[in-house]
Structure formats: C-alpha cells, structure tokens
Image (cartoon, helix red, strand yellow):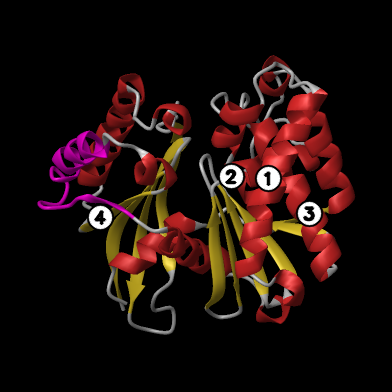
Amino acid sequence: MGVNRVGAIDCGTNSIRLLIADVVVGGSNAGSLRDVHREMRIVRLGQGVDATGQFAPEALARTESALADYAALMSELSVSAVRMVATSAARDAGNRDEFFAMTSRILGTVVPGAVAEVITGTEEAELSFQGAVGELDAAGAPFVVVDLGGGSTELVLGTDGVKASYSADIGCVRLTERCLHTDPPTPAEIDAARAVVRDGLAQALQAVPVEGARTWVGVAGTMTTLSALAQGMTEYDAEAIHLSRIGFDDLCRVCDELIAMTSAQRLALGPMHQGRADVIGGGAIIVEELAAVLGERAGIDVLVVSEHDILDGIALSIAPH
C-alpha cells in the first residue's frame, strides 16, 4: 500500500478552496482520501459578472493572491499532481482568457503544464456527488446532493453513481446581485428573489426527478454555515458540522432569521465567514425553496450537511488508485 499526494482546487463564484490529500493506493482502503490540508478563501471572483459579463480587475487580483499562496503550500508539501477546476463564473466571463493565463502561470510552478479547466455543470455535479456521498450509508439512497454555490446550484440524484443532474443558474452571489439590493432586503426584493429561485428550480426538477430520493445532502459554504447556526455554535466547528442532520423546522428558522438580518448582524454571528455575510441571505432563500420542494415531492424533512464535496471528488479524479 502506498499513497499519492494530490492537490485539488475549486475556484467558484465566491470562494477558492484547496485540498491537499493523500490518496491510498492498493490494499483494502484503496481510493480513500487522507486529508493533509484544507483551506478556503473568499475572493468573490464572480463580482459583477452577472451584470457585466466580465471579471473585475480587483476580483482577478484577489484570486491571483490566494492561488499564489496555495501554489507555494503545494510545493512545500510535495504535491505530485494538481487539478484546478473553475465553475460558474468562469463559464460566463468574456475575459476568461486573462484568468486562465494567470492560473496557468501559477500552477505551472507546482506541476509543469498544469492548467485550470472550466468544467460543465454536469461534470461539476458528478464530482460533487462523488465527494459528498462517499461516507454515507447506502441504505439512505437514493441521494439528492445539492451543491449551492455563488453563481449556480447543482442538483444531483444518484445511488452509487449519478442518475440525473442539472446546474441551475441560481446561487447566493448571483441572486443577491440580481434581486437583494437593500440591507436588509425588502419584502418585495425577497419575493422577487423567490420567484427567480422557483423558476430555476422548476427547470432543474424537470431534469432531476427527486420524487424517489430518500436523503437530501447539502454541501458548500451556505449549507455548512446554516448547520453551524442551527446547532448554536459560537465558532465554526467542521467536525461537528460534517454529516450533521438538521430538521426542516430548525433549518427554516435559521434561514428566516438570516434573510431578515442586515449584513452587519450576520457578520456578528460566531460561525459566519466575513466574506459570506452579505450573500448568505440569498443562499438561505434558495435553501428554503429547496426544502419546500423536497418536502412536498419526496417527503424529506431533514437536511444532511457534508463537509466533503467537489474538492474530494476532484482529488479522487486525478490520482491512480
């Protein structure tokens, strides 16, 4: 039995995240991951992309700074393979060549020839699913995995593999920029946001038949923060959040509170990351609408929150095992 040390980077609309992990090769645990380092930074790469169609210079600069630090750490920890995926914002930006030139230059210092890649919504869904359900009891299948990001939300249905998936153009940053302009948002803005989400989910549910699902698994920062708040945490505790189960009553209570708060009030909450406070109200609206749909169509009344997500799927995809 041996290990391959790999680096996985997920660059989304709101955050850029790094996982350095050892992938076990051979033996009974072949293909399993052992975390070496996980890190997340809010860079808001998708700032203004929905309105302008372009990456903002300051957003590119923030992303470059974070990626340079990640590359230095991967070199220090002797990563042998790296994969960086870019999702919703990079699919939409007209000046994405500038982004890819920057990422190639920095990633090349770790592994010569390494480049960032834009993945499709389908690929994003499959990687998220593999990362999210790896530790769950198969008796809870079929699973519906929801990866709620800054620019898009992926819905994935499957058991031991993906049966159906859809990437909806609704995310906490995109929804906030489009609809939630007041702090706190007005009732009219909240109603408008809910209408946008319902329209996006209606399209998603045509492609992903959730009626047979037994377990809802939520991944990414909005979901993990909601779990922390529902559990009454004063500071973020990833171990207690991972595979936590949140009943819909508690979930919707926390969502309602967040939607009604100002950004400053959200920021004062112990587990809240400072880069998420201004957009998590939009994420909470998406989660409430999802809860309503999954309750009605599948009889689900609990959200399972996983700390393992697309990063784990990326890591598993690049190492022989």
* Quarter in which the C terminus is drawn: bottom left
Q: Position of residue 128 (x, y in %)?
A: 50, 61
Counting residues from the start of the chain, the first of labels 1 and 2 encountered is: 2
- Mark 1 → mark 2, Cα distance in angstroms: 6 Å
Asked whether the residues under the numbered discs 1 and 2 touch, taking CB atoms below 8 Å apart as contact, a structural biologist would say yes
State the residue in front, 78 or 267: 267
Mark 4 — residue?
Answer: 82
- Tally of numbered discs: 4
State the residue in front, 155 or 7: 155
- Dot 2 falls on a residue whose secondary structure is loop
- Mark 2 → mark 4, Cα distance in angstroms: 29 Å
Mark 2: amino acid:
Ile
Examine the rendered structure and indicate whether residue 176 appears above or below residue 115: above
Examine the rendered structure and indicate whether residue 193 appears above or below residue 220: above
Taking the magenta stretch, the answer to whether it contains residue 165 is: no
Asked whether the residues under the numbered discs 4 and 3 touch, taking CB atoms below 8 Å apart as contact, a structural biologist would say no
Viewed as shown, does residue 127 lie left or right of 221?
A: left
Q: Position of residue 266 (x, y in %)?
A: 70, 23
Mark 1: amino acid:
Val
Q: Position of residue 154 (x, y in %)?
A: 55, 56
